Structure formats: structure tokens, C-alpha cells
Image: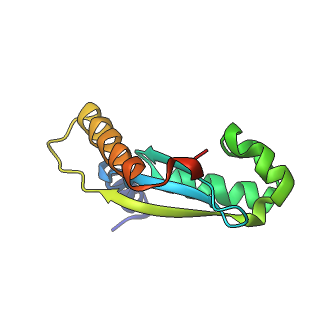
Amino acid sequence: MSEQAHRRELREQYRQTQPEAGVYRIVNSRNGKCLLGSTTNLAGIRNRMEFAKSSNLSGALDLRLRRDIREDGLEAFSLEVLEVLEIRPEMTPAQIREDLATLEALWREKLDPELLY
């Protein structure tokens, strides 16, 4: 297989690969508070968290976390994936977002509202 054909094949595989979607929380280990969210791209959230920590830039994360980041530092925060959504081929982007919103609502019910940002 030529190099060009191999690259074409890899590009096509990338286009057909759905990013991992799910519900996550960013937890402050110092005070136990957490930011609950859902996304169609969990890898993007992981990358954002890693970037914030490696560059020491709190601006990469949600504004609601900024005060505690200033007080406790970025090292106090960690990312937890709570649930990954199983995406079926027939699901539309709107259905995926709707399912994510439902999963996030279910997780909100499980968590103590006093500990949510």
C-alpha cells in the first residue's frame, strides 16, 4: 500500500469515528465541590483540563471554577468521567444531545446540590 493510500485510509477512519460522548464532573478535592457537565467530546474536556494544568491557565476551564482555582490551585481539581453514552449509528446529533441532557439531569439528582458549582 502506498503512503498516500495509507493516509487516505487513515483520514477516512478518522471521519467515521464518533468522539466519545458522556457526563463528567470536575472535582475540587479541597472542598468537595464539583462542576457537572456533559459533552459530545470527552476527549476535548480531558485535553482542556490537561492544558489548563500544564500551562497553569485557569481560563481554559469554566468561569464558575475560577475563584476556587485562585484559592486552591489547579492541582486541587481533577476530571472524572461519570458515564459514557453509547452512540448508535442511527442517532442524530440532536438525539445525542438530548440523551446527554437526560443523563446529566439524572446525575444532578444523585449529587448533593450544595456541592455543585
Horizontal and vertical percent for residue 58? 77, 48
Image quadrant of residue 61?
top right
Give the color scheme: rainbow, by chain, secondary structure or one colour.
rainbow
**In the rendered image, the vertical position of residue 62 relative to residue 19, given as above or below:** above
**In the rendered image, the vertical position of residue 94 relative to residue 56, given as above or below:** above
Depth order, front residue of 27/32: 32
Furthest toward the left, the residue is: 90
What's the residue at 52%, 64% (across, down)?
80
In the picture, which quadrant includes the C terminus?
top right
Horizontal and vertical percent for residue 79? 58, 62
Furthest toward the top, the residue is: 94
What's the residue at 59%, 56% (across, down)?
26
| Residue 70 placement, left or right of 21 | right
Horizontal and vertical percent for residue 39? 44, 45
What's the residue at 57%, 48% (across, down)?
114
Horizontal and vertical percent for residue 69? 79, 52
In the picture, which quadrant includes the N terminus?
bottom left
What's the residue at 48%, 46% (across, down)?
37
Depth order, front residue of 62/67: 67
Image quadrant of residue 62?
top right
Depth order, front residue of 89/59: 59
Depth order, front residue of 50/100: 100
